[in-house]
């Protein structure tokens, strides 16, 4: 029996399988696109987007963070946003960031 | 005799399902500490990358992308199997849940094997912790992740032992769910590390 109610933890395997498939495809796609567009100015944007989507898939389908306590929901949301945003900022404003971070 | 009127008992609001702690509160204290630790390490990465952009662009070219990809596939697959184990026990399918957990354990054991092979490959290609800032940060982050994954593998072994002796049921499986939450969080951390060192050249 599968539970399809959005507000209760799921017992269905299909959404987990789709999430896993998405993670595998995005991993291979990200690697291929990273090589294909190596040196392109917008490559960090692509990498940041892919890493965010992959992290979101794990949060949403494996951890079910949207069903969890608000602290967990917000913490996971913040954690998976931090790296992509920092990647983009470092890629486009690296020199300014380096000046700020110099002791 | 006088009687004192008591106010009508207010209905205690039910805790909505959306406020649950997957597993238990203790594991989320641990996961929070883990995430904070890696946030600090990520800041080390970004500060280093901002100061030495060329070293980071060249360094990624020298790493084995195959190793990074294999570890990523092992992590997401073991995470998937363990999530299936939780879904199965929720549905009351104890035996199936044990099989999924064993599958998760077997796949997760591929991580140490792949990591050892990667380190041997690195050393054969002259890459060690003193090969430059990129590799120092790379070893710092990946070793730290490996340590956390090792705790996770030991956790899987413990939970599997409890599962085999009937420790979890459809009604009470917080230990299994706690282990799954930890492993998924460790999986997310790897997905980020993978993009830092193997994808972003």
Image: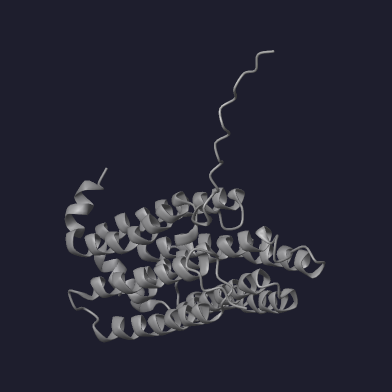
> Whole-percent x and y of residue B22?
57, 58
Q: How is the image coloured?
A: one colour
A70 vs B166: above or below: above
Marker count (numbered): 0
Give the residue drawn at x 33%, y 74%. A50
Which image quarter: residue B120? bottom right
- The one of B41 and B90 positioned closer to us in this rendering: B90
Q: Quadrant of the N terminus of chain B?
A: top right
- The one of A67 and B97 positioned closer to us in this rendering: A67
Left or right: B65 in relation to B54: right
Left or right: B180 in relation to B140: right
Give the residue drawn at x 56%, y 50%. B30
Left or right: A16 in relation to A40: right
Q: Quadrant of the C terminus of chain B?
A: bottom left
Work out whether residue B128 can be spotted: no
Give the residue drawn at x 46%, y 64%. B189
B144 vs B40: above or below: below
Give the residue drawn at x 58%, y 77%. A2
> Whole-percent x and y of residue A13?
56, 79
Which image quarter: residue B133? bottom left
Left or right: B150 in relation to B164: left
Residue lying farthest to the front in this orientation: B1
Residue lying farthest to the top in this orientation: B1
> Whole-percent x and y of residue A5?
50, 69
Residue lying farthest to the right in this orientation: B165
> Whole-percent x and y of residue B10?
54, 36
Work out whether residue B11 can be spotted: yes
């Amino acid at each position: 029996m599968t539970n399809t109610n959005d507000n209760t933890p799921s017992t269905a395997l299909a959404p987990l399988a789709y999430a896993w498939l998405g993670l595998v495809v995005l991993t291979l796609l990200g690697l291929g696109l990273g090589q294909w567009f190596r040196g392109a100015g917008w490559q960090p944007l692509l990498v940041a987007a892919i890493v965010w989507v992959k992290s979101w898939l794990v949060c949403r389908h494996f951890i079910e963070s949207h069903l969890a306590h608000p602290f967990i929901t917000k913490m996971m949301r913040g954690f998976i946003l931090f790296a992509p945003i920092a990647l983009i900022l470092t890629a486009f404003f690296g020199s300014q960031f380096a000046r700020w971070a110099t002791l | 005799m006088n009687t004192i009127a008591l106010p009508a008992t207010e209905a205690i609001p039910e805790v909505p399902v959306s406020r649950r702690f997957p597993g238990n509160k203790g594991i989320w204290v641990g996961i929070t500490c883990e995430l904070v630790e890696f946030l600090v390490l990520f800041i080390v990465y970004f500060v280093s990358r901002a100061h030495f952009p060329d070293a980071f662009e060249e360094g990624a070219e020298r790493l084995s992308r195959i190793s990074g990809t294999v570890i990523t596939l092992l992590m997401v697959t073991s995470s998937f199997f363990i999530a299936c184990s939780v879904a199965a026990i929720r549905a009351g399918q104890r035996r199936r849940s044990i099989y999924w957990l064993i599958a998760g354990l077997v796949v997760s054991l591929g991580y140490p094997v792949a990591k050892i092979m990667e380190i041997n490959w690195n050393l054969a290609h002259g890459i060690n912790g003193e090969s430059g800032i990129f590799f120092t940060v790379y070893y710092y982050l990946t070793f730290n992740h490996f340590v956390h994954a090792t705790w996770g593998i030991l956790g899987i072994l413990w939970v599997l032992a409890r599962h085999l002796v009937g420790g979890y049921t459809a009604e009470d499986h917080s230990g299994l769910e706690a282990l799954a939450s930890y492993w998924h969080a460790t999986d997310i951390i790897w997905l980020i590390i993978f993009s830092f060192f193997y994808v972003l050249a």
